[in-house]
Amino acid sequence: MELFGSWRLAWTAAALLGLTGCGLRLGAGIPEAKVVFGPRGLAVPPGRAAAVWARVQNPENQTAQVTLHLDLPPGATLISGRREVRLRLPGGGSQRVRWAIRFQRPGPARLRLKGTGGEQTITVSVVEKLRTPKRFLLTAFTPPYAWREPPYRDELLADYVNTGFRQLLWVRDEAPLIEKAHSHGLRFYLDVASLIGEDPYLRGESGAIAPPVPAERLKALEKSIARHRDDPLLEGYYLVDEPYPGAFENLAEVVERIHIQDPNRPTFADVFPYFAPDEGSPEYLENFLKAVGVDLLCTDRYFYFNDRTEEKAFLEELALMRTYSQRFGVPFCTILQAIGTNGTSHEELDWRTPTLGELRWEAMASLAYGAKAIVWFHWDTDWGIVGNPEGPAIRDRLKTLNPEIRAFGEVLLPLESLYAGSTEDAGAPIHANNGAFLLGEFASLDQPERYALLVSPDRRKEVQSTLVLPGQTKELAIFDPASEGWKPLESRYEDGETRFLARFAPGGGLLIRYKKP
């Protein structure tokens, strides 16, 4: 941690620089604009896009024109934003320019911002395995005591653990609640939203700019991080649920402070899904990831209704998240529907409770598309699993599924997604002799093995199918989630193809490992 202490000093120096700015003069008689380039003291893992900014302010009464040019070091790629930026600021105006830059080479990466009258540099430390997930996140949104006040009862947490959960998505910074998490061996994300104020500062409102975060709330966040960053059960930092664009600047500031104070732990945010009526478009995702250097990107798409099932929309959402996850180098998470709303206080949502096969299918589909975390919606409150008329049945289903999902997730966690789609696609690496199976192919980029997760389309009954790989595939093995080990898979080679018989539970997944010829 001594390494990171120097970053905190660098960040403090940058804050002092920000008070004075750096003047970029455009010529005699033209107002001087003040530019601050940041952040200072930031670190990212290789492959992750860092959020970089320039704050431009015109302190004069006349209009100012500013030209900025961003120079990148070798191994850095501009993911979002323009290298050449021209601004025209009215008197007293200010603007923040944003870039997302991905770094591949470990070590210090020096960025240079040049303007008409000056030059500034910042150094981003690119550190192997920094803020990469150390374990597969399988949790619930909302977790126990997300909203409930004391007293904190052991029974509710014990019930949660008994259903197969080992992590709490967020815990308020309250000593009795954190003590309860410790007593049940639950890892947890610290609830940043309750420290800063999810409303109005971190979520904001549609079409409005969120007010700046008060200094005392930022100070409270820093004190909370200092109290808990040595806690071995602290998993990361939970930020916000579905922020509007007007809150992105606040979120960016909060994430920077977390990363500089506790560089090893990830930050988590849930964004609007693509099909949400307010936000969630590709442009929304682009602007969010360009502004906010979040470490785990999450979305939700609930699709089991009483009169229909919108699985196509669900798969399109997964495909969109995979695209932006790979582009910005940020792992993604899915929040999945566990409940129905019939007989609850939210009957107007018209959701039905998924069967065991349907729950398994949406989890396996998420993994096939490359999700690195799964969150079930939802546990607590009067219409979550705790208060749902079908709560006992849902608990039993998740108790069956959670160990299986975690076992698959742990294998896939360090792997790169190479392909996501259907066995019927022309370019699919595996084909089936009956039906269209969802398919995700994965690899560790420094190892010769390939991994494929196939997901049955039938959520009502067990099915079997002959699966076909081109060429004479070597060392074919199947993963057994019960033992969390690999077993040889019997196959035959004929007509230039490797064939094997696969059996699937309802909505089930089959994970195989092989070497290509």
Image (cartoon, helix red, strand yellow):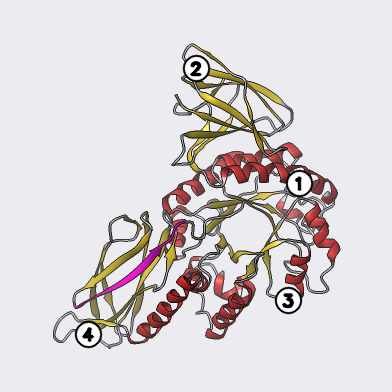
Q: Which mark is residue 175?
A: 3
Main SS of the magenta part reads strand
Q: Which mark is residue 31?
A: 4
Circle 3 SS class: helix
Please tell me which of labels 4 and 2 falls first in the chain: 4
Amino acid type, callout 3: Ala
Of 177 and 476, the residue lying toward us: 476
Circle 1 SS class: helix
Residue at the location (51% across, 38% down)? 442
Spatial CA span between label 1 and label 2: 38 Å
Spatial CA span between label 3 and label 2: 60 Å
- How crowded pointer 3 is (Cα within 10 Å; few <14, some 14-19, many 20+) is rated as few
| 202 with respect to 148 (left or right) | left
**Position in image of residue 86 (x %, y %):** 25, 69
Amino acid type, callout 4: Pro
Spatial CA span between label 1 and label 4: 63 Å
| Residue 204 visible to an observer of this rendering | no
Q: Which residue is mark 1?
A: 398
Please tell me which of labels 3 and 4 falls first in the chain: 4
Residue at the location (27% across, 72% down)? 87
Please tell me whether mark 4 or mark 2 is closer to you in this view.
Answer: 2
Q: Which mark is residue 497?
A: 2
Please tell me which of labels 1 and 4 falls first in the chain: 4
| Residue 288 against residue 431 in the figure, above or below | below
Amino acid type, callout 1: Leu
| 55 with respect to 206 (left or right) | left
